[in-house]
Amino acid sequence: MAAKAKASDKEPEDDVAGGEEGAEKAAPKSKFSLKLIALIVGGVVLVGGLGTGAYMMFGHSHESQAATPVVKPAVFVDLPEVLVNLSNTGSDRTQYLKVKVVLELPDALLMQQIQPVMPRITDTFQTYLRELRPTDLDGSAGLYRLKEELTRRVNVAIAPNKVNAVLFKEIVVQ
């Protein structure tokens, strides 16, 4: 029995020693599992971030394209040809300006609304063009100023409606 008592005395020590070894073995396992969990969480965050970035880059571009309104094609209205003599500042020679103009309208409805005021538009053009000097039409800058001024005057004549632009079909200075 004494041998059994000694053996039983040793068993708890073995259990304690085994417990200490188990604790040492358990500690590396817990460190390993924490690293594994951190890697998995980091991978999930990385994949989620990449997915979100791809959605923001590609997913929103389709939505923004779908959200943009469809642009209606412009409507063009020909105005009658205008022939005026230019303002003469002391020169003996009379110069003439011949202009063919087209109005660019945002929609076809505006064309019906402009038809009744077409004589007002023609009068506005002739009144303004008769006051121009030949030097006012020099170069592309002069023609650009003329185009902008005619657009402004048409918009005043047809207010509250608006034209997009006045376009030149033909300009001749003689």
Image (tube, rainbow, N blue to C red):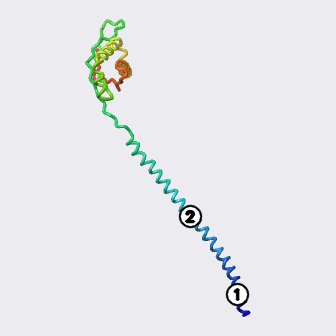
Q: Residue 168 lies in what quarter of the image?
A: top left
| Residue kind at label 1, given as amino acid type | Ser
**Mark 2 vs 1: CB contact within 8 A:** no
> Is 8 left or right of 158, judged from the image as shown?
right
- State the image coordinates of residue 161 (x, y, percent, origin top left): 35, 23
- State the image coordinates of residue 48 (x, y, percent, origin top left): 49, 55
Residue furthest to the bottom in view is: 1
Residue 139 appears in view: no
Q: Compute the Cα span from label 2 to label 1.
A: 42 Å
> Is 53 left or right of 149, judged from the image as shown?
right
- State the image coordinates of residue 82 (x, y, percent, origin top left): 27, 16
Around disc 1, counting alpha carbons within 10 Å, would you say few (fewer than 14), some (14 to 19), or many (20 or more)? few
Residue 125 appears in view: yes
Residue under pointer 2: 37
- State the image coordinates of residue 6 (x, y, percent, origin top left): 72, 89
Q: Residue 18 lies in what quarter of the image?
A: bottom right
Q: Residue 147 lies in what quarter of the image?
A: top left
Residue under pointer 1: 8
- Is label 2 in a helix, a strand or a loop? helix
